[in-house]
Structure formats: structure tokens, C-alpha cells
Amino acid sequence: MPKWSRYALAATFLVYFPLAFWLKASFVDLRPAGKIVVQLQRPFEKLGPYGAIARYWHPAAKLEDADSPENEERSTVQLYENEQPLGPAHSNHTDVSKTGEGRYSHWVGQGFVFSASDNTDPNTNGRRYWAVVP
């Protein structure tokens, strides 16, 4: 094998693998599994330094059994950031907004009050947020 063809082969591998990894990371649907899976829709309303409120999702599935003053742990919906579950669930809205770190609640009449796992702004951090009924 000529010397130049070895260089061409090495260059191909050096370009191919990073490009393939980038394409996979950019275009893979990081969607968690569940009986009902809906993507929370931006823009999210800001709540304190770390919290956000999602009032809309797609598809517009009816996600029943939200938490309420009568039953603060009724919701079975699990929130995800890409494929990683957030939590703890049923968190107090003050804790979501001031502490963050993935806390959330599914609240009747409000939608989802949540925070990113690393306290970045969910409107701009490039991650997708999902509501999943297991």
C-alpha cells in the first residue's frame, strides 16, 4: 500500500468518527419511553432564579391527576431532561424556583413547574423536556 493511501485512510478515520458522533448527538431523538410521552413546549415562563413553568406540550395529550392543594402527591407524571429523569417530584414551588437542581411538580391549573438539573435556563440550554406517564 502506498504511503499516501495510508495517510488518506488515517485522515478519513480522523474526520469520520467525530463527524458521526456529532451527527448522532445532534439528530437523535432523546425521547424517554412511556405510555404517554409529550414534549414540553418553549417558551417557558420564568419563576425565580431557577424555576420555569411549562403550560403547553405536544402532542396536546390530557395529562390528568395533577397535584392539587387537596392531594399534593397525586400526579404520576415523571419529567425528563432529554433521557434523564428529573426530581424530586412533588416539590414545593419555592424550592423549585430558589434551589432548582431538577425539582418539579405537576400542578392543577398551572402545568409543570420545574428546573433544569444544573440550574441553567431551560429556554436556552438546548435540552428537551418531556412529561412521561409510565
Image: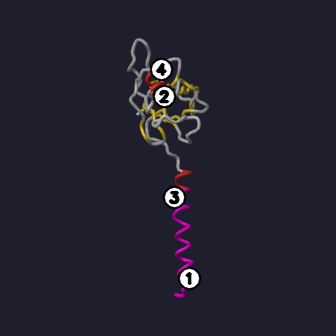
Instruction: Please tell me which residue is depicted at 47% across the width and 38% down the height of the picture.
Output: 81
- Which comes before the other along the chain, label 2 or label 3? 3
Amino acid tagged 3: Phe
Q: Check whether the beta carbons of the residues at disc 3 and disc 4 lie within 8 A of each other.
A: no
- Which comes before the other along the chain, label 1 or label 2? 1
Q: Check whether the beta carbons of the residues at disc 1 and disc 3 lie within 8 A of each other.
A: no
Q: Which color scheme does this rendered protein use?
A: secondary structure
User: For numbered disc 3, what is the local secondary structure?
Assistant: helix
In the depicted view, which residue is nearer to us: 60 or 12? 12
Q: Where residue 35 sits: x, y (%)?
A: 44, 35
Measured along the vertical axis of the image, is residue 17 above or below residue 126? below
Instruction: Please tell me which residue is depicted at 54% across the width and 77% down the height of the picture.
Output: 9
List the residue tagged with mark 2: 114
Q: Check whether the beta carbons of the residues at disc 2 and disc 4 lie within 8 A of each other.
A: no
Amino acid tagged 4: Trp
Label 2, label 4: how far apart the Cα atoms are: 11 Å
List the residue tagged with mark 3: 21
User: For numbered disc 2, what is the local secondary structure?
Assistant: strand
- Which comes before the other along the chain, label 4 or label 1? 1
Q: In this view, which residue lies farthest toward the bottom?
A: 2
Q: Is residue 95 covered in magenta?
A: no
Q: Where residue 125 sits: x, y (%)?
A: 55, 40
Measured along the vertical axis of the image, is residue 105 above or below residue 15? above
Label 1, label 2: how far apart the Cα atoms are: 54 Å
User: For numbered disc 4, what is the local secondary structure?
Assistant: strand
Q: Residues within 10 Å of mark 1 (few under 14, many from 20)?
A: few
Residue 5: numbered disc: 1
Magenta highlight range: 1-22
Q: Nearer the viewer, mark 4 or mark 1?
A: 1
Label 2, label 3: how far apart the Cα atoms are: 30 Å
- Which comes before the other along the chain, label 2 or label 4? 4
Mostly what secondary structure, the magenta segment?
helix
